[in-house]
Amino acid sequence: MAKMTYAQYRLLPESRNQYELFDGELVITPSPNVGHQRIVGRLCAQLLTYVEAHSLGLLLVSPVDTIFDPYTVLQPDILFVSCERIPDTVKEHIEGAPDLTIEVLSSSTLEKDRRRKLAVYSQFGVRECWLVDPEAQTIELYAREGGLLRLTRTFSCGEAVASPLFPGLDLPVAGVF
């Protein structure tokens, strides 16, 4: 079977579904539920306040095509591109690896987010990935070490997320859930 390219992907009709390409394989996911979107909204609001106060870069919420190569196009729930990387990365869409991707896990996307997307983010040079687990009420921080994304810390309720990308950030995990 032939791999789908980004040019073919762009011809798909708009819908409430989320389309992503994994090495030319089209994966369709229904739109997220209200609980998922509440978490995305809370997390985005807290991060956006910090990013804008410190003039660090651009924070975006899905849907926005993030093009890693002609056959791999994902839509992270939230992404961040630092000021220094904006000229090379931010075009009509995101072209290349963002500095940070955030995925809010759900039962319908757990395997895709935890395995497939994390592998793509690692392969293509994302500096940091957060996996937000509503059931466990945790945020797993994966940072680039030795050329790969590796789990460096899991933050629980009662703790605040600290990230090398955001010096001085004090993001209470409980406020996300």
Image: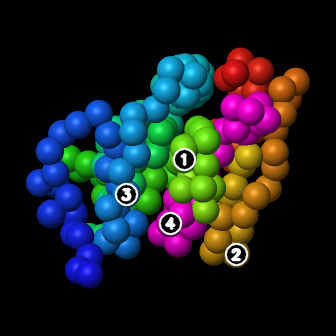
Evaluate whether residue 143 shows in this view. yes
Q: Residue at x 72, y 63 (%)?
A: 150
- Residue visible at 57% across and 67% down? 119
Quadrant for the N terminus, please: bottom left
- Callout 1 amino acid: Thr
Amino acid type assigned to the residue bearing label 4 in the image: Val
Can you tell which of label 2 and label 4 is closer to the viewer?
Answer: 4
Q: Pick whichever of labels 4 and 1 is earlier in the sequence.
A: 1
Q: Which mark is residue 109?
A: 1
| Residue picked out by circle 4 | 120
Question: Which SS class for mark 2?
Answer: loop
Whether residue 67 is situated above or below residue 159 in the rendered picture: below
Query: Badge 3 is on which residue?
Result: 27
- Please state the extent of the stretch shown in magenta in the rendering: 116-139
Tell me how far mark 4 sits from mark 1, CA to CA.
15 Å
- Spatial separation of the CA atoms under disc 2 and disc 4: 16 Å
**Secondary structure of residue under mark 1:** loop
